[in-house]
Image: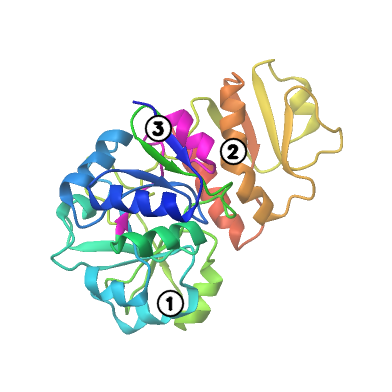
Amino acid sequence: MTARVYRGTDRNLSFLARRLRAGELVAVPSETVYGLAANALDARACRRIFAAKGRPRTDPLIVHIHSLRQLAEVAVPNPAALRLARKFWPGPLTLVLPKRPVVPAEVTAGLPSVAVRMPSHPLFRRLLQRCGLPLAAPSANAFGYVSPTTAAHVHHGLGKKIRHILDGGATPIGLESTIVDLRDPAHPRLLRPGAITRAQLNRALGTRLGAKTTVGRESEAQVAPGSLKRHYSPHAQVVLHPRLAQRAIAGGAPDEAWLFLKRPAGGKRRNVFWLDRSGTHAAVARRLFAQLRELDHAGFSVIHVELARGTGLAEAINDRLRRAAAQ
């Protein structure tokens, strides 16, 4: 079995919607990263996600919906959740809420809560509307590896394990969604930073978000995905630096790559790379996972990366880098 890649035509979307209703898997583009989608209300279909990815059942799935009306069908919303949903949806924000009984335990790692998001990618939204179902969709890659941001990434990693990939081009954000825990609306917590920043959420809620204080263990049920210490990781060792120095590069080994956020003064050499000419955080985030994959496939055994400076999206960039570098 080798996956087929589909363009986003009306005919293809109708066909893929039928496949999803039949319990099959479809890799889909979103504004964050590519996801591996299945009917979120079909336990058997969701188990196929875990099998294809090699994902532990303790790591829950995000349920994607098309309309705000669907939120109450899969979760129990509260005023704080509705405030964030109305401000940031469709968009890269996931809310963790008490779940409805219709959501199977496979989706939620057996916990009484569910993570829900309304994506903004036009192809994903059209597919959600066509199939008329909420879709569970983690990143469309082998568990723990760098998330895919193109259909080619999905095909390279899962092309022999799934049948269908919807090609929506490169993802515009390039990092997974922000996750906020609103099970207790009086004490909201930021579980995973993303393109919707902490400052934006604080302003919308009128309070300061707490942070998750513990690192998840793979053997324990997680409230939300992206909680494990090591995640989003290439096969190469990732070494983090507050700032990369040219003199360190000169003393490096031939199999070491040096990844700058913006173009360094010395220009590009065989083992020197950068994510954006000017180092803007949005461009860095958009290119980060693709560049880590390219360096991994090029055979480098060590990738030196400098951390982003500042706040906002820098928090999400550094979160992914620290998890990629964790031992």
Give the crowd class for mark 2: few <14, some 14-19, many >=20 residues within 10 Å. Answer: many
> Which residue position is annotated with label 3?
3
Q: Quadrant of the C terminus?
A: top left
Q: Which stretch appears magenta?
A: 135-157
Q: Secondary structure at mark 3?
A: loop
Whether residue 130 sits left or right of residue 104 in the image: it is: right
Q: Residue at x 59, y 38 (%)?
A: 290
In this view of the protein, which residue sits in the foreground, 161 or 205? 161
Q: Do the CB atoms of the residues marked 3 and 2 lie less than 8 Å apart?
A: no
Q: Of callouts 2 and 1, which one flags the residue occurring earlier in the amino acid sequence?
A: 1
> Which residue position is annotated with label 1?
84
Give the crowd class for mark 1: few <14, some 14-19, many >=20 residues within 10 Å. Answer: some
- Residue 85 counted in the magenta span: no
**Residue positioned most to the top:** 254
Across and down, in percent, residue 76 comes to: 23, 75
Task: Tell me which amino acid carries mark 1.
Answer: Leu
Q: Of callouts 3 and 2, which one flags the residue occurring earlier in the amino acid sequence?
A: 3
Across and down, in percent, residue 88 comes to: 49, 73
Quadrant in the picture for residue 94? bottom left
In this rendering, the answer to whether 21 lies above or below 5 is below
- Residue 156 counted in the magenta span: yes
Task: Tell me which amino acid carries mark 2.
Answer: Ala
Instruction: Single out the mark in the foreground, 3 or 2.
Output: 3
